[in-house]
Amino acid sequence: MRLLWLLFTVVALTSAGVLQDSTKKRYDNFKVYKLNIQNKIQLAAIEKLGELTQKYNVWREYDRNTKQVDIMVNPEEMPYFQQLLRLNNITSEVMVENVQALIDEEQVTATADSTAFGWTKYYELEEIQAWLDEVLAKYPAVTEEFVVGTSYEGRTIRGIKISHKSGNPGIFIESNIHAREWITSATATWFINELLTSVDAEVRNLADSYDWYIIPVFNVDGFEYSHRKDRMWRKTRQPHATNACIGADANRNFDSHWLESNGASDNPCSETFAGDQPGSEPEAKALAEFLTNNQDKFDAYFSFHSYGQYLLSPYGHTSTEFPENYDDILAMGKAFADAIEALPYGTAYRYGSTAFVLYVATGTSVDWVFNELDKKIGFTIEYRDTGRYGFILPPVQIIPNCEELLVGMLALIEKSKELGYF
Ligand code: 0X9
Ligand code: ZN
Ligand code: ZN
């Protein structure tokens, strides 16, 4: 009887995911709050919390337009956090009651799926790499692998080039530079599949008329870590010489206005740590080199992120200056957002310069490509949602999100063609 009881307990605990992955960081009763910020004092108080990595994690930095911050709070810290909100008169709304519950749900869907690669679950790095190999083997005439370089932990950063004819203008896509933004690589692989298999005339035209360079998972070390150890990991995995905190924000590590204007942090414990110097992260250094060496092969650059539903353009370093072709950029942004909103899902995207519509961000890949390689089209796409699930976007939303990207991309490219960019 006792044995049976023990067995029952083991089965129950295992299916609840308690015994599985005991080395995985758990987020039981961690909550995510959306805070409404009304002044600089409130903002300063909240921004300090972000560096206390055991207690808090900033999911979404202060947004200039909505004046909101999304922050995850450790249950043990809850009384202090509540007090801090009260003392500073900060109003809030709970977006996620229990982060671990969302993580568990995400995994339940995962194991229920079949063996074939599809877009109803999120895959680990190894599975994505294997899928990429299959695709390369299946379409040898129009695909080709390219290697950007090697990550800190020694993984290969790979991409796929899709080209149906020579002389096409090129479009470059980098995805999953932030590890926890899983929807980005799911969307990148779906898009690759569309370019290769769709029979839709518009999509065929998109595939045939451009050379596509797509890196589905750029931050390979971080992505692996987000699957195996910590679902909320964002940064690279290179340890810091003088600090216990690991990794830097690869999207703050490029040599364009690096660490200027509070667009990044010099604290290794911050989620937006810029690194010790531009290119200190081997991944960012490798990408900058690769793009420099191949700059004549592409005219547009996209970086896939989540979340917030934005199409962001340069500049990230200043909200008071704009690129000389900003009117065109806005027209492309409007085309993108309108096309997405016209789908039955009715998803709304905002568009405009990063620093103007969101926040100041320096040393990003897109701004580096735009400023240093002098490309005229550079966008950051922040996918679904606006905070209900945040980074843990349920797998049922993968395909709707992909469909949104496709119509948005079609409209954006069409508009840029109309404006004479291609
Ligand atoms: O802060 C970021 O790096 C991006 N947002 S995220 O929540 N995914 O971390 C926005 C980057 C804006 N991009 C450019 N200025 N190019
Ligand atoms: Zn500068
Ligand atoms: Zn991101």
Image: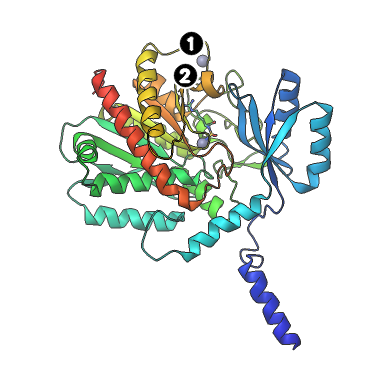
Can you say whether 253 is above or below 150 in the image?
above
Label 2 CB-ligand 1 distance < 8 A = yes
Figure colour scheme: rainbow
> N-terminal of the two: label 1 or label 2?
2
Question: Could you say whether the residue bearing mark 2 is in a helix, strand or loop?
Answer: loop
Query: x%, y% of residue 36?
Result: 69, 27
- Circle 1 residue: 321
Residue drawn at the location 50% of the way across and 32% of the way down: 251
Q: Quadrant of the C terminus?
A: top left
Q: Residue furthest bottom?
A: 1
> Does any portion of residue 269 appear in the rendered image?
no
Q: Quadrant of the N terminus?
A: bottom right
Mark 1 vs 2: CB contact within 8 A: yes
Can you say whether 107 is above or below 383 in the image?
below
Query: x%, y% of residue 132?
Result: 33, 53
Label 1 CB-ligand 2 distance < 8 A = no
Hey, which quadrant is residue 37 in on the image?
A: top right
Question: Could you say whether the residue bearing mark 1 is in a helix, strand or loop?
Answer: loop
Q: Which mark is residue 161?
A: none
Q: Residues within 10 Å of mark 1 (few under 14, many from 20)?
A: some
Hey, which quadrant is residue 414 in on the image?
A: top left
Is 142 left or right of 104, judged from the image as shown?
left
Can you say whether 127 is above or below 1 in the image?
above
- Circle 2 residue: 315
Query: x%, y% of residue 129?
Result: 38, 54
Amino acid type of the residue that numbered disc 1 sits on in the rendered structure: Glu
Q: CA distance from mark 1 to mark 2?
A: 8 Å
Amino acid type of the residue that numbered disc 2 sits on in the rendered structure: Tyr
Q: Nearer the viewer, residue 147 or 35?
A: 35
Residue drawn at the location 71% of the way across and 40% of the way down: 56
